[in-house]
Amino acid sequence: MLTYRLFHVICIVALITSISLACAGTAMAQDSNKIKESEKIDDMTTQSLDELLNKLEEFIVVTASRREQKMSDVPATVSTITAEDIERSGALNLAEILRDAVGVVVTRHSGNFPQYSITMRGLKSDFMNERTLVMIDGAPIYHPHAGGIDPSWIPLSNVKKIEVIKGPVSALYGANAFGGLVNVITKSGVDNDSFTSARVGVKTRKDLDSDETISFPFYAVNIGGNMNKFDYFLSADGFTNSDGYMEKHQGQESIDALGKLGFQFNEKVRASVTGFVSNDQQNVGYDNAPDPFENDLTHVSAYVEATITENYSLLLRGYFNDFSVYVKYDDALDKYETLGRVIGGEIQSTYKIGENHILIAGADARNDKAEMTTWEFDWGAGGYPPPVKQAGYEEKTTKSMGFYVQEEYLGIDKLLPIFGVRYDHNSEFGGALSPRFGLSYEVDKGLSSYLNVARAFRAPNYNEMYINGFGKVGNPNLDPEYTMMYEIGLKGVLADKKIRFNISTFRHDIENIILCKPEDPDNPYSLDQFINFADAAVFGVEAEVSHEFPLGITPFYNLMFLDTDDGKGHPFEKTNETKLIAGIHVAQKGFHIKFQARYKSDRFHYSSNPAIPVNEYDQIVIDEITTMDLFASKTFSFNAFIKQIKFSVIVENLGDKIYTESFASWVNQDMRRQHGRTLIIKAIGSF
């Protein structure tokens, strides 16, 4: 209780601080003309071209309203992660970089074996059972078996920017955007005649099983450019900690490649195609290693966009996802494969009607197909009757389509209302309507408040309906989930862009929330089943503040506080209700250093392990976590073949804290420990 009271106080302090900074920033902005132009020029010359472009682009977002829009005009809570932010971290994949995003909790379900899930604003997710839509360049990427993707499968070396939309956006993007949306925008060759970059590095840490110090390399190569009307971009990256991949627990090898080809027919018509392939091999890391866990992913998307007239533009897009997840345990019987395939397409029209109206209308359709091969496994050791059960399901197919329209009215000074609605039809669950109303008000230059009211739905996935394994039973009679969100916020970029903040408070009312609960709560040997548990609720506060002082010193913090109710008077299982990140960043003429501390509150899991007596059946608590990270880099510029080299040293988990983020009662908990102090050394070169 003391922790919750403390963070209630922090929430209030965050609110007061943000408003105070806003007021101070407005006053400072009025005096900004006193800054000498020579000082501005000197500041610009210490930054690379990429850094300058990032500073310009981070205030423009394309995902929130399906068109380019200033972040201050968006009536929603939006975070951006730039390529520069990625470089200033030890993150190698999407899961790792999202750990620092406000309102987002990333859970690593094992130690070295990286099964990740994204929880946004308390709308929790298990491994791949996502309530968050992930996209690459605007095209959805998800496995239909569980409706999501392990974000560690998406590398970062080819990423230009990541846009994170908190809260439901089903009014534009449909069923999977129930809790929020992550759009990964990759690099291209449009802006450069020719460029090449390479990244090499090594991670060093202790092995969780042997306590030996192990190191593994990672690498990436990017090549891009344009010729006449063509532009291209190629990227390959990977890593291995296979120092005993098949001999030690939880080894991992990964290789990914992305290619983009664009063609500019004329100044009004452009086409582009993107292909992404990924292969990831891991040790499952349960009681009898070595055992392979292999993921294969193929993603292809293509679009054509055309400016038909000055006031009308058209976008056509198609996409294809193919997944294969293969797992083999120590026994020949204990193996299975989960296959998934998604084919989809969309058409979108954007109309400018007169001077005051922007109308966006579109339609999309997709075909989801998945299959989980039937397999046998022995739960006898855990006491689950019967000792041998069948798992898996035959091929399932779902067809869905949606139609949406959104109106932005520009005719009111300083006020921007947005009205939107979408209708979706699912071949299994029928139709659903998702309306949205947003309102943005410009309080002062660089300072705006916003209101966002939205409804969303999520159809049950195949895993929730048909799984029959891992101590869980599917339920084909599930109903879709619905949520109604109410949000108000204040955001600002003030004092010559030196003060930035965003604070919001929100509430989600969730109907028919799907949870996994024991079939028979009075029987400790009961299997868990997915059910529509109750009507739940989430109340939350988010704050994100940074302030750049002279000498390039920038303190920052972001805070998330949640109060959840599962409908039966209990907080959500597997949900961190408080997350706080605070630190300081210093940038000086090619030298950067950043220190930050992360805090996540405790979380609990209901245990369904029959080995635990009935009187201890209620819950198992995962302790609160506090870790610290340190980053330092130095950039060297040249005029020769090598244009620039940046050397970086990162130390994650400075205190060498061994902790657990997740619990599964049927797995040895040693497998759930997170690794301790990790040293990362990397070099990035531009040619």
Image: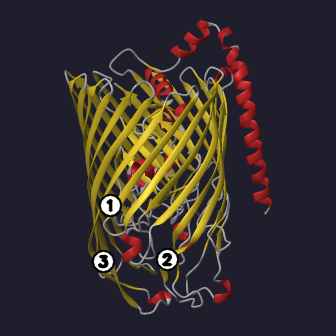
Res 687 → quadrant: top left
Taking the spot 70% from the left edge, 23% from the top edge, the residue there is: 26
Disc 2 is placed on an element classified as strand
Disc 3 is placed on an element classified as strand
Instruction: In this rendered view, identify the residue nearer to me: 43 or 190.
Output: 190
Q: Nearer the viewer, mark 1 or mark 3?
A: 3
Q: Which mark is residue 531?
A: 2
In this rendering, the answer to whether 592 lies above or below 80 is above
**Callout count:** 3
Instruction: In this rendered view, identify the residue nearer to me: 328 or 135.
Output: 135
- Residue 258 visible in the shown view: yes
Q: Earlier in the sequence, mark 1 or mark 2?
A: 1
Query: Disc 2 residue type?
Result: Ile
Label 1 – label 2 distance at C-alpha: 29 Å
Give how far across and how far down residue 3 sits, in percent: 76, 58
Res 661 → quadrant: bottom right
- The residue identified by callout 1 is 295
The local crowd at label 3, few if under 14, some if 14 to 19, many if 20 or more residues have their Cα within 10 Å, is some
Query: Disc 1 residue type?
Result: Asn
Give how far across and how far down residue 637 sits, in percent: 44, 19
In this rendering, the answer to whether 548 lies above or below 19 is above
Taking the spot 36% from the left edge, 78% from the top edge, the residue there is: 330
Label 3 – label 2 distance at C-alpha: 19 Å
Give how far across and how far down residue 292 sits, in percent: 34, 67
- The residue identified by callout 3 is 393
Query: Disc 3 residue type?
Result: Tyr
The answer to whether residue 435 is left or right of residue 623 is left
